[in-house]
Image (cartoon, grey):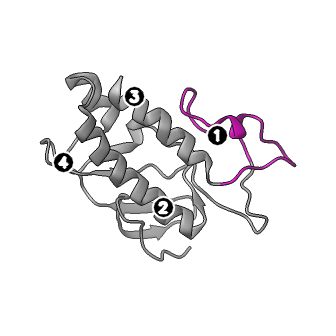
């Protein structure tokens, strides 16, 4: 297993090691809540706050796209505030369903969270793949959640 660095605005991996049964990651500690919890407690965001958070999220997705990675489970619960106050930025985490795009520029397999998953993932199969653009659909649904 190799680690070549994290995308900007993604949860940083500080170190890792492998055992026979597990891969253990040491991740940076963020003080804030995930955005699902934050919005559930405090209510929807103002447009300016949503725009700032989407900028952070899309910056991360752009770096992932360039690296050929699809997150495949983008949702507010996987986006964390860096601080508990309103001035914190957001970072994307939970890469458990992430996948590298293959040589054919496609990813295969169904995964994701109902309500946030892109339609392309739902129709995927053994011979039907999708690109890492599926994360853009999920980002749009996430923006809707931020505002409504």
102 vs 80: above or below: below
Q: Are marks 4 and 3 in contact (CB under 8 Å)?
A: no
Q: Quadrant of the C terminus?
A: top left
Task: List the residue tagged with mark 1.
Answer: 111
Of mark 2 and mark 3, the one earlier in the sequence is 2
Magenta stretch in the rendered image: 109-131
Q: Residue at x 53, y 50 (%)?
A: 96
Camera-side residue of 86 and 73: 86
C-alpha distance separating marks 2 and 3? 21 Å
C-alpha distance separating marks 2 and 1? 21 Å
Q: Are marks 3 and 1 in contact (CB under 8 Å)?
A: no
Camera-side residue of 139 and 22: 139
Task: List the residue tagged with mark 4.
Answer: 31
Q: Residue at x 68, y 34 (%)?
A: 119
Residue mark closest to the camera, 3 vs 1: 3
C-alpha distance separating marks 4 and 3? 22 Å
């Amino acid at each position: 297993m190799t680690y070549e660095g994290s995308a900007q605005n993604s949860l940083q991996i500080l170190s890792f090691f492998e055992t026979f049964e597990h891969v253990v990651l040491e991740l940076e500690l963020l003080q804030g809540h995930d955005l699902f919890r934050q919005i559930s407690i405090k209510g929807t965001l103002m447009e300016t706050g949503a725009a700032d958070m989407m900028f952070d999220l899309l910056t991360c997705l752009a770096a992932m796209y360039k690296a050929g990675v699809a997150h495949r489970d983008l949702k507010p619960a996987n986006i964390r505030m860096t601080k508990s106050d309103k001035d914190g930025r957001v970072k994307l985490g939970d890469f458990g369903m992430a996948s590298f795009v293959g040589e054919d520029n496609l990813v295969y397999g169904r995964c994701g969270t109902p309500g946030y998953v892109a339609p392309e993932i739902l129709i995927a199969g053994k011979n039907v793949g999708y690109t890492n653009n599926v994360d853009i659909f999920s980002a749009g649904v996430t923006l809707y959640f931020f505002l409504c």
